[in-house]
Image (cartoon, grey):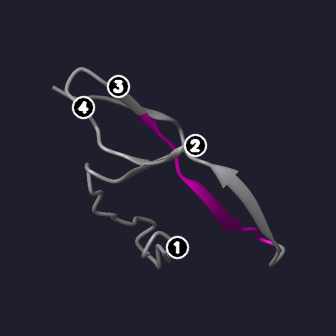
């Protein structure tokens, strides 16, 4: 819940992540020390012509200790 957001005029969003319930292909799983997890944002851009396009952010790797 809350993952669909509008960036408004600032162009930014924020999302609190529960490190005990990270989505994975096999369901939710906790992050464990020593793991590296990868995150990416899927977003929609409004084009100058009024149409919207789908796009992805740069990927981010986080190493947990």
Where is residue 64 shown, x and y percent of the image?
22, 29
Where is residue 20 shown, x and y percent of the image?
26, 50
The image quadrant that residue 26 belongs to is: top right
SS for callout 4: loop
Taking the view exactly as shown, the residue that stands out farthest to the left is 65
Number of marks in the image? 4
Using the numbered discs, state the Cα–Cα distance from disc 4 to disc 1 in whole angstroms.
26 Å
Task: Give the labeled residue for mark 1.
Answer: 4
Of residue 22 and residue 11, the one placed in the foreground of this image is 22
SS for callout 3: strand
In magenta, the rendered stretch is 38-48
Q: Residue at x 69, y 52 (%)?
A: 55
Secondary structure that dominates the magenta span: strand
Mark in front: 2 vs 1: 2
* Badge 3 or badge 1: first in the primary sequence: 1
SS for callout 1: loop
Of residue 7 and residue 50, the one placed in the foreground of this image is 7
Which image quarter holds the N terminus? Answer: bottom left
Where is residue 62 shown, x and y percent of the image?
32, 31
The image quadrant that residue 17 belongs to is: bottom left
* Badge 4 or badge 2: first in the primary sequence: 2
Task: Give the labeled residue for mark 4.
Answer: 32
Q: Residue at x 46, y 77 (%)?
A: 9
Where is residue 63 shown, x and y percent of the image?
28, 26
Using the numbered discs, state the Cα–Cα distance from disc 4 to disc 2 in whole angstroms.
17 Å
> Residue 36 — which label?
3
Does residue 54 appear to the left or right of 59 in the view shown? Answer: right
Mark in front: 4 vs 3: 4
């Amino acid at each position: 819940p809350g993952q669909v957001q509008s960036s408004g005029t600032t162009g930014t969003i924020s999302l609190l992540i529960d490190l005990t319930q990270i989505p994975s292909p096999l369901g939710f799983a906790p992050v464990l020390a020593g793991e590296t997890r990868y995150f990416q944002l899927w977003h929609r851009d409004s084009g100058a012509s009024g149409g919207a396009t789908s796009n992805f952010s740069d990927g981010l790797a986080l190493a947990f200790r």
